[in-house]
Image (spheres, rainbow, N blue to C red):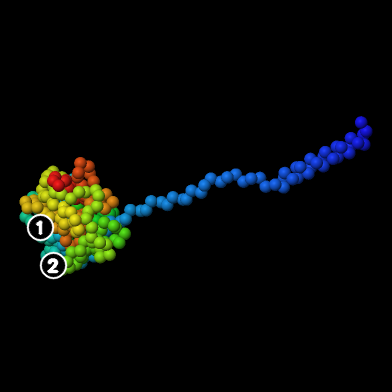
Amino acid sequence: MNPARNKAALRLAAGAWVALVGAAAGQDAPAPSAPPAVPASEPPAAPAPFAITLPEGRGGVPGTWDLSRDGTNRRCVMTLASESGEAGQKVYFPAGCRRSVPVVGAVAGWLFADGVVRLVDRNVRPVLAFAKRPDQRSYVATAEAGESYSLVPLEIAAMRASSPLDPTAIAAAPPDAAPDPVPAQAPRSAPGPGAPAGIYALDRLLNRDVCRLDLGDGPGAPVRLLPGCRDSGIEVFDPATWRTSEGRMTLVAKRGHVVNLVPAGDGTWRRDPETGVAFVLRRVAP
């Protein structure tokens, strides 16, 4: 073969190869298909806080309180009065409290300072100094012997308004105002799914069926204490209406105080948070 012709053929082949490579390089490679965009999941909403029901100052303390020894059924419903006595402000409680909660036998008055409620003796020495629990819904104190006591408000003259973020809480009504347990902007409704209407027995730690409550149905969902109630705490609380929401039951007192309960199995509902003496409702009749 002619050498000159071979060189020309090689040059033509090389040029064609360069052109082919250049054309391929000039094309954009198809982009890999991107996975479908997944919207970022929003973090779960934080649970609504409970309404703060403890007083901010001494003026909010006077009222009826439930004093109990933790882990027992020993309790005393006492009144912290606004008038002054020989040892701070006056304290009133039934004589039976000295038997059920012996530590109150030394109590002669109460004081309030720096967010602490002190039950004091005749020499104004602290018998029990109650500090707020983290949930802001009760006080706790430890006696000299080491036992723990809870102090829970039942009726407080100056109750703070409930948090607007709490869907189960309401603002306390003034003492002379007609009770209206549902915010004005929300229509009254019957209890929702979760807790059926009917007769419920109130069980304490060691005592069962100390009181029976008739939880009604329909608009307003009334509550009625049946005759023969043997529990002074629920009588002082004086529930007027009830409702269920998001798996919780709420008893609402005439003056706006609330007790929240959660399912405990077998048709029972326990107070949440569990402070003071056990508080369990058990459905006994439709």
Mark 1 packing: few (<14 Cα in 10 Å), some, or many (20+)? some
User: Residue placed at 15% from the left, 49% from the top?
Assistant: 198
Mark 1: amino acid: Phe
Q: Secondary structure at mark 2?
A: strand
Mark 2: amino acid: Glu
| Figure quadrant of the N terminus | top right
Mark 2 packing: few (<14 Cα in 10 Å), some, or many (20+)? few
Residue 27's disc is none
Q: Earlier in the sequence, mark 2 or mark 1?
A: 2
Asked which quadrant contains residue 85, the reply is bottom left
171 sits left or right of 77 in the view: right
User: Residue placed at 10% from the left, 60% from the top?
Assistant: 92
47 sits left or right of 69 in the view: right
* Position above or below: 97 against 17: below
* Position above or below: 73 against 79: above
Q: Position of residue 109 (x, y in %)?
A: 14, 61
User: Residue placed at 79% from the left, 40% from the top?
Assistant: 17
Q: Secondary structure at mark 1?
A: loop
Asked which quadrant contains residue 5, the reply is top right
| Foreground pick, 92 / 214 | 214
| Foreground pick, 160 / 73 | 160
Q: Position of residue 131 (x, y in %)?
A: 24, 56
Residue 233 in view in this figure? no
Q: Looking at this view, name the residue that lies furthest to the top.
A: 1
Q: Position of residue 285 (x, y in %)?
A: 13, 46
Residue 181 in view in this figure? yes
User: Residue placed at 19% from the left, 56% from the top?
Assistant: 218
Q: Circle 1 is placed at which residue position? A: 93
Q: Position of residue 274 (x, y in %)?
A: 22, 49
Q: Circle 2 is placed at which residue position? A: 83
* Position above or below: 231 against 61: above
Number of callouts: 2
